[in-house]
């Protein structure tokens, strides 16, 4: 019978030789980084880069102290504590190869909901150089309609009245920075690792709004002393499944209560603007640049838009996952044609990036059969995604006289998707979107007004007034509603009509 070892520091030496594990002395590590939001992406990305750095350089001041602010974070806190903060990263390659490595860069975990003072004091200590974040877009507390900080949030109101006992990330950061200012300690860097365009700028704007409402003088100090580097982050990290946990136990004899799965590809482009010391992540593959904007735009208009192209077209066709779309030659060809013909011409040159190689790598990544990315997940909240991912490419091409027909079909497919809510076979599609009702009502008007969907201005702006685009779009809507076999329209665009 196979011996099963619980994952912890004591049993590291008992793990199979095929499993990479930390060779550095974790007991000597101090946590120069505190990270709020220790989910799967943080553990496959920043914590992995940091683990690589600890292995390569032997530095001992860049361990990570994880932080959870909510009661919902107690589960990951308890699991990591039982495992001495170790976890397995399961890297799944397109050819079926699986690499397992134990990550050791997290050395502690604190729960703010249990002891907010202890978390604040740790952030305020001289040891802490960076407070990094993966709190999802919703965690930044901005009003989607105005882009401004939402002071109506009950937790924000609580934090303004009780700065010593905060609930939000802004309350913690502000109070910790206040304590550093009082004792004349340099500010730490606030580093967003969320998949948000200009994530550092967003963090800065929200934190300054909160801090100004609490203490205008402190807000001024934060504005002058705290750096918020923008960064582009990328690594597909699916939700951990029971099968992943069983695989580790049955095949490798490792009992890991919460491993993380990911693809082999990883990218991190960071603006080199730090208010304090920083790790030399560039030694392990991160790219430091003066301005991250071109890299963000590249990712948004190729990777994120590419996901939406496959997600909407594939859903109507009847595909269920991204990899099944890419395994279909028609969909793979269509995606590449969209990227080459419409997305790339409006990107320009991006230093250090070969766009042809990048696009080829995207198609390989999307086609990874071991990363089952469900199309229903890809299409979640499309009303907040497409205005950032796809519509700017359409507008740029219209301005420059470029092609928009491949994107137009995606918008027509989104109209059908929102209206009918079924694929071409009549199978129901799961639609999760804050604007689901508005999208449906606008799409349902298509039979009376072909441009009804495009006239939803919170999503499309003035796109319905562009005659070039509306002619393409209306023609595609006509054909799609007459025959929802999306492959016929795709083939016509790619190869011409017979």
Image (cartoon, grey):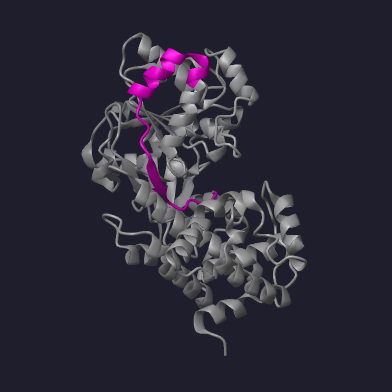
Callout count = 0
Q: Hey, which residue is sitting farthest bottom in the picture?
A: 498
Q: Which region of the structure is painted magenta?
A: 211-239
User: Between residues 383 and 328, which one lies in front from this camera angle?
Assistant: 383
Which residue shows up at 46% across the image and 35% down it? 202
Asked if residue 224 is positioned above or below residue 467 in the image, the reply reads above
Which residue shows up at 69% across the image and 65% down it? 416
Which residue shows up at 53% across the image and 57% down it? 391
Return the x and y of residue 254 as percentages of the image width and height.
46, 46
Residue 233 among those drawn in magenta: yes
User: Between residues 165 and 72, which one lies in front from this camera angle?
Assistant: 165
Return the x and y of residue 435 as percentages of the image width and height.
68, 48
Query: Is 463 left or right of 82, judged from the image as shown?
Result: right
Return the x and y of residue 490 as percentages of the image width and height.
56, 76
Query: Is 151 left or right of 247, judged from the image as shown?
Result: right
Query: Is 63 left or right of 159, judged from the image as shown?
Result: left
Q: Is residue 121 visible?
A: no
Q: Is residue 60 visible?
A: yes
Query: Is 41 left or right of 19, judged from the image as shown?
Result: right
């Amino acid at each position: 019978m196979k011996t099963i070892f619980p994952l912890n520091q004591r049993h590291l030496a008992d793990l199979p030789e095929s499993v990479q594990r930390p060779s550095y002395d974790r007991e000597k590590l101090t946590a120069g980084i505190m990270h709020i939001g220790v989910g799967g992406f943080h553990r496959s990305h920043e914590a992995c880069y940091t683990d690589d750095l600890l292995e390569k350089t032997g530095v001992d001041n860049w361990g990570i102290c994880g932080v959870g602010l909510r009661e919902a974070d107690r589960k990951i806190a308890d699991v990591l504590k039982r495992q001495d903060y170790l976890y397995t990263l399961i890297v799944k390659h397109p050819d079926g190869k699986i690499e397992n490595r134990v990550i050791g860069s997290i050395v502690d975990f604190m729960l703010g909901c249990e002891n907010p003072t202890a978390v604040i004091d740790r952030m305020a200590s001289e040891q802490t150089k960076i407070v990094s974040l993966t709190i999802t877009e919703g965690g930044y507390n901005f009003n989607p309609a105005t882009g401004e900080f939402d002071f109506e949030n009950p937790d924000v109101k609580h934090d303004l009245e009780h700065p010593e006992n905060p609930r939000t990330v802004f309350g913690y950061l502000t109070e910790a920075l206040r304590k550093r200012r009082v004792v004349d300690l340099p500010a730490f860097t606030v580093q967003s690792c969320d998949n948000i365009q200009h994530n550092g700028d967003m963090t800065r704007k929200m934190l300054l709004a909160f801090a100004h409402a609490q203490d205008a003088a402190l807000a001024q100090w934060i504005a002058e002393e705290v750096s918020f580097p923008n960064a582009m982050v990328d690594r597909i990290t699916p939700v951990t499944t029971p099968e992943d946990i069983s695989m580790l136990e049955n095949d490798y004899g490792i009992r890991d209560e919460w491993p993380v799965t990911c693809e082999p590809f990883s990218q991190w482009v960071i603006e080199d603007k730090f208010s304090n010391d920083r790790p030399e992540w560039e030694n392990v593959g991160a790219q430091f640049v003066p301005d991250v904007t071109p890299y963000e735009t590249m990712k948004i208009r190729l990777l994120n838009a590419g996901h939406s192209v496959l997600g909407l077209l594939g859903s109507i066709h009847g595909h269920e996952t991204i990899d099944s779309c890419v395994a279909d030659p028609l969909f793979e060809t269509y995606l590449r044609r969209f990227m080459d013909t419409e997305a790339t011409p409006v990107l320009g040159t991006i230093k250090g990036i070969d766009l042809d190689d990048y696009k080829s790598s995207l198609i390989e990544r999307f086609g990874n059969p071991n990363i089952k990315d469900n199309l229903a997940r890809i299409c979640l909240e499309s009303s907040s995604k497409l205005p950032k991912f796809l519509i700017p490419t359409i507008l740029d091409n219209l301005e420059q006289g470029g092609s928009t027909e491949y994107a137009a079909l995606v918008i027509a497919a989104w109209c059908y998707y929102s209206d009918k809510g079924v694929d071409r076979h009549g199978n129901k599609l799961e639609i999760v979107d804050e604007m689901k009702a508005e999208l449906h009502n606008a799409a349902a008007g298509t039979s009376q007004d072909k441009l009804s969907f495009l006239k939803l201005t919170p999503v499309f702006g003035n796109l319905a007034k562009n005659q070039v685009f509306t002619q393409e779009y209306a023609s595609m809507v006509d054909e799609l509603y007459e025959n929802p076999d999306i492959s016929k329209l795709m083939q016509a665009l790619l190869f011409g009509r017979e």
